[in-house]
Image (cartoon, helix red, strand yellow):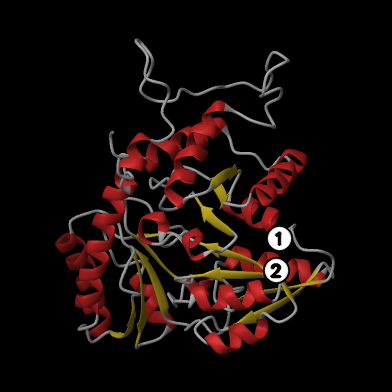
Amino acid sequence: MTEDAPALKPSTVAVTAGRPEKQPDAPLNTPLTMASTYVAGGDLEYGRYANPTWTAFEETLGALEGGRCLSFASGLAAVSTVLDLVGQGAKVVAPRHAYLGSIMQLADLEARGRLDAQLVDVTDTDAMVAACDGAALVWLESPTNPALELADIPTIRAAAHDAGAYVVVDNTFATPLLQRPLEMDVDLVVHSATKFLSGHSDVLLGAVVTRDDQLYDVLKGRRDLVGAIPGTLEAWLALRGLRTLHLRVERAQANATELARRLSGHPAVEEVRYPGFGGIVAIVLGQGALAADLLVHKTTLWVHATSLGGVESTFERRRRWKTEPATIPDALVRLSVGIEDVDDLWHDLERALDDLAG
């Protein structure tokens, strides 16, 4: 009698899931299937319903998160599809600090009378629990974007489920390598796969993962109906990015940890925010917004850009966006730490910070 094989580690899953069947002369990688039309009588039928290249990406991310995955044209397409789950006038609870696109979608839907959005300080667990009363959906980020706050996911999830609400966690910052919300019994996980999952700043893609087959079918039906489908090339590139996710996250996290330590000792930096994991760091400069704006134009390696999660290091002052919540410090700079040499990254930052401090 043979024992069951041990469960594969996430790094192995990232490399091996979503592969074609091993047969002589078969490709190792799932090929691009550039098709809008299929011969009738099978499972695919039409290009808006399915594509083998999407499926390979979805199988891999689903295996990493521990559920069934649907890919979307963008992270915001995934967010929009999930928000469609709630009925007319329903209450949605979300963090006051979160991905700006998610907050703006909630504000737009509320302005049109579609739902009632209640934004709460996610670090105030008692307030979050109280807000769950009467909610249809509770949206969480942990860490939050860009404030890097952590939520007590199990406690909030329990309160939300007691109230009969769905619980969604945007896991873009943590990735399934550092946090698996479905194992905390949440209902849905959302990703902007544009970020760490793809990892090379060349893809727009979103994803939703769930263990609930009924929710999966509803979301799949919405995707089919509104056509919020991924491009085939984008899905292929995202899967290619997933193959090295564990290596990139490990290096970015090591760099971020060291940079957070060094930044905390620099006189130009008033505050360092780092949750202790992941590749995102936020700093608040003591000299205010002008200094923050100057910082992002003084470096050579660091790139001033609004996205994150790529192999290259990027940063920006978040309040340059007028719709960013006023509770985000005006001089907060969000750093997306890449996989370059940490000493090179530090020296580039240090020179720019020294100029400001001097």
The residue at 20%/70% (across/down) is: 258
Instruction: Report the front residue among 220 and 7.
Output: 7
Q: Amino acid at mark 1?
A: Leu
The disc at residue 163 is none
Residue marked by disc 1: 83
Q: Tell me the quarter of the image containing the N terminus.
A: top left
Residue 263: percent from the left, percent from the top?
24, 77
Report the quarter where the C terminus lies: bottom left
- Give the distance between the C-alpha atoms of the residues marked 1 and 2, in whole angstroms: 8 Å
**Residue name at image x 30 percent, y 73 percent:** 276
Q: How many marks?
A: 2
Q: Position of residue 351 (x, y in %)?
A: 20, 71
Name of the residue lying farthest toward the front: 1
- Is residue 84 something one can see in this rendering? yes
Q: Are marks 1 and 2 in contact (CB under 8 Å)?
A: yes
Name the N-terminal-most of marks 1 and 2.
1
**Residue indicated by mark 2:** 106
Label 1 SS:
helix
Q: Quadrant of residue 232?
A: top right
Q: Residue at x 55, y 56 (%)?
A: 190
Vertical placement of residue 200 versus 153, above or below: above
Q: Specify the quadrant of the image occupied by residue 275.
A: bottom left
Instruction: Tell me where residue 298 sits by quadrant.
Output: bottom left
Indicate which label's residue lies in the foreground, 1 or 2: 1
Q: Is residue 33 above or below residue 115?
A: above
Looking at this view, is 229 or 209 the one in front? 209
- Specify whether residue 306 is in view: no
- Left or right of 207 on screen, residue 38: right
Amino acid on which disc 2 is placed: Leu
